[in-house]
Amino acid sequence: MPKIPKFDFSKLKGILKLGKETKKESTPSTDAPSKEKPSGEKGIKGLLEKIKYFISTFWHRKVLFFTFLGVVVLIVAFGILLSRPKVPETFLSEGTQTVENLIISIPPGAFPYEKSFKVRVVPGNSVQGMVSSGNFVSPIYELIPNDGRYDMATLPIKVRYYFPSNLIGSNDSNALAFAGLSSDGKVYNIIPGSFIDRDSRGYFVEASFFVVPRWLGVVSVPGKVLQTGIQEVYRVVSAYPPLLIIPGSDANFAGYYQSSKVTPLSTWQGVFPDRSIYVYKYPLSDTKSYNYTRAFRTFQQSEPMQSPIVFEAERLAQELKRYSNVQFDVLAHEVGGLILYYCLAMHPEIKNIRKVAYVSTPFYGTNVVDPRLATTIYASKPSAAALLYSLPESVVATIQGYLKSYIEAINIYYSDILPNSELLKRLQYLPYRTDIPTIAYMGNTPPLSIDVGGSLFEKFYPELTLNLGDGVVTRNSARLPYMTLKIFNGSWNDFYSSEPFIEEIKKFFAFEIPEIPAYKDDTFAERVKSEKEKILERFITSGSTESFYVDEWKIGDNPYIKFLRTYNYPGTQVAVYGGIVYTADEKGLYVAGTRVWEEFVIGLKETIEGVSYGTQRKVYYRKLADTVTFEQTPADDFIATKDYAIFAKPRDNNKIDFVDNTGNVLVTLQGVYGRVIYDGNELLFVTNREVYRYFYGIKYTAPLGLRNSYDITYAIVADDYIIATTRAYGLLVFDKMGRYACVGEGWIGNLGLYRSGNFIVAVGDSFITLIDFSARRIHRIVEDVAGIVYDATVWENKIYLMTSEGLLIYKIG
């Protein structure tokens, strides 16, 4: 191999040197005279010759030439790279990271395995070809998982974007929302539940999601303003009660359409053309404005249970009070049903609700909103999951999409409707509003042809099992014990538009326009309290614990209770007189299972020498074949005897007037709801605060203290003591001097108290308790009775339980 000569870099200086010396060395001398050229021309020509010579020299030394050329190219390329703007990006697995104005937070344990993401701003030229960026007011961010899998998290991932305040215009605006782009970048979907807030850095919009989208950004709808509260959709001058719709996550249920070009429309107008239609609007899926967010934050600071459902329930209560002169029939769906129920239970003073229909309302929660369960199937390939869970591959893929979309649609409400959530536990202790006729409805078919019956998933998702659930609720979760449940063909988001359901809801909300009575001057004045009443009306702030012995039994083991038989009688109410069993429901009155009266019957109970019940227009006393009729009046409760009727009528300032059928006020008690009870010996007027023995004119007031307050639900007299149940499932015992003791709180049934021989029977929604009061002994029956208890009564030594499984009869003593 020929040896390459080394190049002497010191010669480079000489090569580049300008002047005649270099030329003389390379050109032979001559004595011939030459014509002198201008100096400028000689300089340019000389420079060109030197450049030519320099290049020629480099070319002959090829290694040096290419080395020099490579260095120049590298310098130029490096300069270009330095001049290009750097793409902002960050990496995170857990915790919080920032990319420009975007903050993303992944809570610890969000994924059950090691997982990280690269988050970067998508360069502007890469955005072209995606969805039109005209609606986006932020950069588009790309989220790239290290394993390439866009799985579902078990905890919500939060994103926040700071924006200039001029993008919203006002603090009631909800014009901004996070949106995720489809995998091909051509479509974007708003992430439900975004909200607008502000901190020391400025305004921001924030959202939560469980499945990380590939691309993410913030979109704007200029001029949009959040609307909340009861909104009038359709007005008609009519005597029929208006219909109030309270929707859930299914926007179609409201049937509500609004545009700046047309008047608001509702599909329910076609069902109820003679009624005005109202919709209660709240931002379940819409972006929450700054003012709404601030109100929610203030509520969370003052309320131990920081629940959006409780927050909305309080706002709904304010709205219903604002419309106190309007009597509504209410149709509530899914989450909207929970908001309504909590509102009515916590505010018994709200009396402007005539009837309520709860549609697919998860009173005991729903598993389809649990992301922990969803991750077991979402992360699987449909083909693998089909084999593992014994399901068709197409069903697996559909389940994956349905669970993701439902959980995202519920957004921050998801934790409230998980089974055994704090909200639902608390809801079980709230008093029933039995003064409002109520029915629960559900479907029998999961949506999208899903059916997990016969698979391993049936245990996890009964809501997705044919004939057990409708996609959100099951038969066990769709109603509370005192409610009648009706089931229709279809899923939670479509059966309500079926013809059978529409006919049923028309029937339930049917209204007979009352005749206008002749004018009558109201001349009676409020009765002045006697000195005796003033002495007995007091709050007792001290008490002692009453000693009771408690034994725990199963029904079959306890010697004092014996199951006799079951009758398959229809109804949800029961009363017995003369050994004849009366039952009742919205279809009529039944005697020994045979319908004898076809009309919506309410308030069936035992009265003095007979039974009492009512309809929309009349109140009836019945003893065998004899009946006496009185005019019905708006009241929380009533009772009829052969000589008179008594009504519990609420009034302002948390007081209840107990009036007879002539309008005479018998007594006024403190409280927000009232009840008239015949305990087998005497009449009791009961509110949540007081008990009044009508025949003796003696009043007892429940204690109210800083730590404990006792809301009474039922009461009877035993051995000259007042025995009362409380909303907290306890017993209050008053002696005739008004002193009290509390016992058994947390496990005494509060639906009713019934005396049979030496025992008092406390009835709950699925259990009974025997109380031997004279012996101070409680027989706690820990075994549930068959079915859910709607109502109860006693006759002689038998207790009759009206349940979802029929009429159960037990012998006591």
Image (spheres, rainbow, N blue to C red):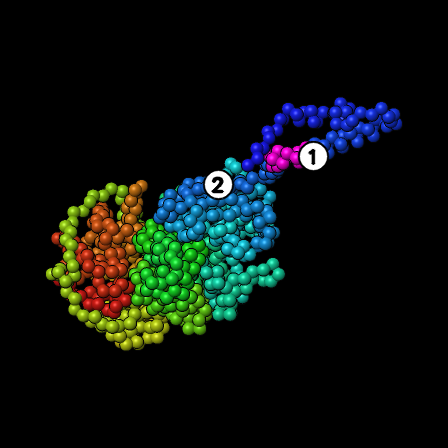
Q: Nearer the viewer, residue 603 or 678?
A: 603
Q: Which residue is mark 2?
A: 90
Residue drawn at 22 percent across, 72 percent down: 567
Label 1 is placed on what type of residue? Ser
Residue drawn at 31 percent across, 41 percent down: 706
Residue drawn at 54 percent across, 66 percent down: 236
Specify the segment rendered in magenta.
Answer: 55-71
Q: Nearer the viewer, residue 121 or 569?
A: 121
- Could you say where residue 283 lies in the image, as x and y percent from the top left? 48, 53
Is residue 447 depicted above or below 718 in this figure? Answer: below
Q: Nearer the viewer, residue 594 or 739?
A: 594
- Could you say where residue 403 lies in the image, as x and y percent from the top left? 40, 58
Secondary structure under tag 1 reads helix
- Left or right for 374, reference 768: right
Label 2 is placed on what type of residue? Thr
- Could you say where residue 174 lies in the image, as x and y percent from the top left? 54, 49
Q: Which residue is mark 1?
A: 56
Q: Which mark is residue 419?
A: none
